[in-house]
Image: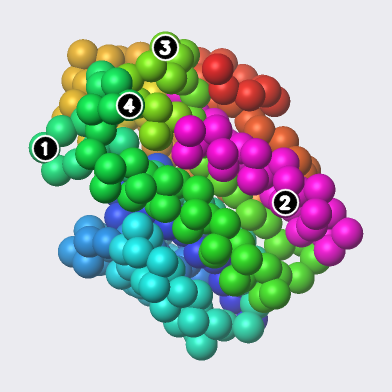
Amino acid sequence: MQKFGVVTGASTGIGQAISVELAKNGIFVALVARTVDRLEKTKSLVERVGGKAEIFPTDLSKIESVNELISKIKAKTNQVAVLVNVAGIWHGESEVFAGKDLEEFPQEVILDTYTVGITAPTLLSHGLIPLMKPGSKIINISGTFESGAKGWVPYYVSKRAIEDLTIGLAEELKKKGIQVNCVSPSDTATEAYKKYYPQYIEDSIAPEEIAKFVAKLYSQGTTGKIFVIKKNKTPFVGFHK
């Protein structure tokens, strides 16, 4: 039976690259994001490398949508080999949610950032752990913050929280043989990053580099680690600043 994986934020950037890389490793990928046409693009990229995938359009900022996703996955499979929580909110359609003091953020942006960044991964883990056998993986995507938290506190807090979720779940699930790790990449050359920070592209990491590391991590038995990835440096265990 083909192994089944779930990737959030699969429509673009890191999530798209991870979906393709897992598919190369023989995993059927449930592609999760809001935008149908972009999910279809990811699916076509998966199929181009000989993989298989299905799209699951979901607004992770809505708890009812998260619960519907869990139900759909349970209807599709009785075993999940890997859950990769990539989705996060740091920009909208026309602006970056950065360079602002906390009190300047709309309340809706703060709540959506927390829901997508930490509540949804927690609920997905809660809902899908019963489908995970020994050797299954949960891999969370965080981010380094070399310039600190100032200016984008909601996103920073959501990513700091997912690292804490990683450590806590790893301790709890060790007895079940389920490994939980986190990958914390520095600036990554996603479509959004190219749009908002073109001046820094040369110093950023390709999403495919992160995807290859995630696939490597999937094949290992490591647990409870946060791996920091920086351009032209060997990944190392640590915490973001």
Q: Residue at x 27, y 15 (%)?
A: 200
Q: Of residues 90 and 183, which is closer to you in this image?
A: 90
CB atoms of marks 1 and 3 within 8 Å: no
Taking the image as shown, residue 175 lies to the left or right of residue 3, namely right
- Measure how far apart labels 4 and 3 are at the Cα level: 16 Å
Instruction: Kindly identify the residue that appears in the image at 67 percent across and 68 percent down.
Output: 129
Residue underneath mark 2:
169
The numbered dot on residue 102 is 4
Give how far across and how far down residue 182 sits, in percent.
61, 40
State the separation of the CA atoms marked 1 and 4: 19 Å
Measuring from the top left, give residue 21's x and y in whole percent. 48, 51
In terms of sequence position, does the residue under pointer 3 or pointer 2 come before the other? 3
Q: Residue furthest front?
A: 103
Name which quarter of the figure residue 105 lies in: top left
Q: Which residue is mark 3?
A: 147
What kind of residue is marked 2? Leu
**Marked residue nearer the N-terminal end (1 or 4):** 1
Distance of mark 2 from mark 1, alpha carbons? 35 Å
Real-space Cα separation, disc 3 to disc 2, in angstroms? 28 Å
Q: What secondary structure is the stretch in magenta mostly built from? A: helix
Query: Which residue is label 1 attached to?
Result: 94
Report the magenta residues as a range.
Answer: 157-186
Instruction: Give the position of the N terminus as an image quadrant.
Output: bottom right
Question: Residue at horizontal 35%, vertical 64%?
Answer: 62
Is residue 116 depicted above or below 143 in this figure? below
Query: Residue 178: percent from the left, percent from the top?
Result: 76, 59
Q: How is the image coloured?
A: rainbow
Amino acid carrying label 4: it is Leu
Percent x, y for residue 151? 32, 20
Other residues around mark 3 within 10 Å, as few (<14) / some (14–19) / many (≥20): few
> Circle 1 — which element?
loop
